[in-house]
Amino acid sequence: MDALGNVLQNVGSGISGLFGDILGAVGAAAREALHALQSVLTVAWLPVLAVALIALLAWNVARR
């Protein structure tokens, strides 16, 4: 029974590592997108864009 427990533990560790890597990649992509956006837009436009995106998201949620 210990061998089966070890196998299940290794499978669980592999799956959790996979999801951890996926979340890390998504976070890195979001950071890079934000850095690219900051280099294109001036600092004054970033809050305006953030408010517009939040309003668009709220409108889509309310429409459903």
Image (cartoon, rainbow, N blue to C red):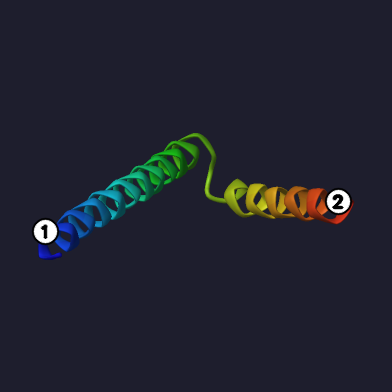
- CA gap between label 1 and label 2 equals 50 Å
Q: Find disc 2 in the rendering and name its residue.
A: 64
Q: Which mark is residue 3?
A: 1
Q: Which quadrant of the rendered structure holds the N terminus?
A: bottom left
Tell me if residue 37 comes above or below residue 59 in the rendering: above
Q: Residue most toward the right?
A: 63
Residue 5 appears left or right of 28: left
Please identify the quarter of the rendering in which residue 12 is found. Answer: bottom left
Labels 1 & 2 near each other (Cβ < 8 A): no
Q: Nearer the viewer, mark 1 or mark 2?
A: 1
Residue 9 appears left or right of 63: left
Please tell me which residue is depicted at 80% across the width and 48% down the height of the picture: 60
- Determine the secondary structure under disc 1: helix
- Determine the secondary structure under disc 2: loop
Q: Residues within 10 Å of mark 1 (few under 14, many from 20)?
A: few
Q: Residue most toward the front?
A: 1
Q: Nearer the viewer, residue 4 or 50?
A: 4
Q: Nearer the viewer, residue 54 or 40?
A: 54
Tell me if residue 38 comes above or below residue 48 in the rendering: above
Measuring from the top left, give residue 31's x and y in whole percent.
40, 46
Q: Residue most toward the left?
A: 3
Q: Which mark is residue 43?
A: none
Measuring from the top left, give residue 8's x and y in whole percent.
23, 57
Please tell me which residue is depicted at 85% across the width and 56% down the height of the picture: 62
Residue 13 appears left or right of 39: left
Please tell me which residue is depicted at 44% across the width and 37% down the height of the picture: 39
Task: Tell me the amino acid under the disc marked 1.
Answer: Ala
Q: Nearer the viewer, residue 8 or 14?
A: 8
Measuring from the top left, give residue 26's x and y in whole percent.
41, 44
Task: Tell me the amino acid under the disc marked 2.
Answer: Arg
